Amino acid sequence: MSEPLIVKKMEGPVAVLQLNRPHVLNALNLALMDELVEQLKQLQADQDVRCIILTGNHKAFAAGADIDEMAGVSLAEMKMRNQFMLWDLIPRFTKPLIAAVQGYALGGGCELAMSCDLIIASEKAVFGQPEINLGAMPGAGGAQRLVKAMGKARAMAYLLTGRSFTAQEAYECGLVTKVVPDELVLEEAKKLALEIAHKAPVAATLIKEAVYKALDTPTQVGMDFERNAFYMCFGTEDCREGMKAFQEKRKPSFKGR
Ligand code: CAA
């Protein structure tokens, strides 16, 4: 039997999904993206899962969309293939998703990491959108998200030259949550995942949505969403439990309802 494209491991309330095409630096082919979204759907439905980590291996998170699968494809085929429909689903899953990045996160790999809610990166990680070197450009949100993260001046230069940038630079511009030594990436991601996993899941989901509203909509639209989301928290048992636990000077136990 061939190796799975995604290896899933459960660690309590945290699921770890590992991209598994090491012979091509985890190049993201259609089958792998299909499998990734399928796994995320299953984790979404699993009430015991509170947070998800997406990772690669020490050499590559992912070196981009699979070039062999794209070479020679016509405009019409590419349009009808509609491959990014699956990618667009990734930030829409409601459970917090952390990218644990070692090695290359290039092209679609960088876009995939940026589609996650948080990024923990190795100090040796290499980010970039080198599609221009292939006569192409980002297609899974790279031009949008990079500009929002680092501003037009720097993003434009990286997109037009295809040059890569370091984890430290990614951290300084706010693209990456934390940079850690290479061997600690997964450990640090798990620590963060576990901390989030113990928070109230409905509030976590609403916070995610509110943050994306801040990025994607005018302030007043985001404010209106945020206000209603705040009210929605008061419809949950977890909100009652959280406030009661504070008053009783004990740790809350959140159930996700
Ligand atoms: N697609 C297909 N295969 C890939 C790949 C990719 N994106 N990236 C690496 N590979 C394969 C290589 O072809 C090579 O396979 P073989 O051993 O069979 O020759 C294997 O992975 C190892 O790669 P290298 O020998 O090139 O490794 P290296 O350490 O010398 O270089 C690298 C590493 C700089 C990342 C180089 O592999 C590279 O430049 N890769 C392509 C990066 C890229 O252009 N990504 C953008 C893709 S397009 C895209 O992502 C579009 C989008 O917006 C979604």
Image: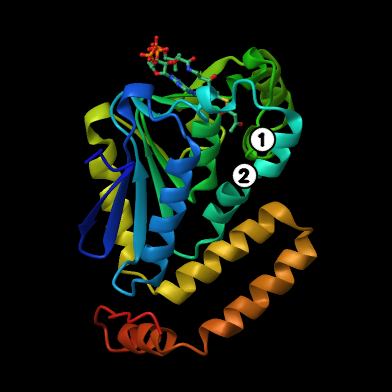
Foreground: 171 or 65? 65
Circles 2 and 1: CB atoms closer than 8 Å: yes
Q: Which residue is rendered at x = 49% and y = 51% of the image?
A: 117
Foreground: 249 or 27? 27
Q: Which residue is rendered at x = 54% and y = 33% of the image?
A: 108
Circle 1 residues within 10 Å: few <14, some 14–19, many ≥20 = some
- Residue 159, by quadrant, is top right
SS class, disc 1: loop
* Colour theme: rainbow
Read off the residue under disc 2. Answer: 84
Q: Report if residue 96 is visible in the image.
A: no
* Amino acid type for the residue under numbered disc 1: Gly
Asked if the beta carbon under badge 1 is closer than 8 A to the nearest atom of ligand 1, the reply is: yes
* Amino acid type for the residue under numbered disc 2: Phe
- The Cα–Cα distance between marks 2 and 1, rounded to whole angstroms, is 7 Å
Read off the residue under disc 1. Answer: 139
| Residue 64 falls left or right of residue 101 | right
- Return the x and y of residue 82 as percentages of the image width and height: 66, 45
Asked if the beta carbon under badge 2 is closer than 8 A to the nearest atom of ligand 1, the reply is: yes
SS class, disc 2: helix
Q: Which residue is rendered at x = 57% and y = 33% of the image?
A: 173
Quadrant where the C terminus sits is: bottom left
Q: Is residue 131 above or below residue 48?
A: above
Q: Is residue 120 above or below residue 89?
A: above
- Return the x and y of residue 76 as percentages of the image width and height: 75, 35
| Residue 11 falls left or right of residue 93 | left
Q: Which residue is rendered at x = 46% and y = 87% of the image?
A: 236
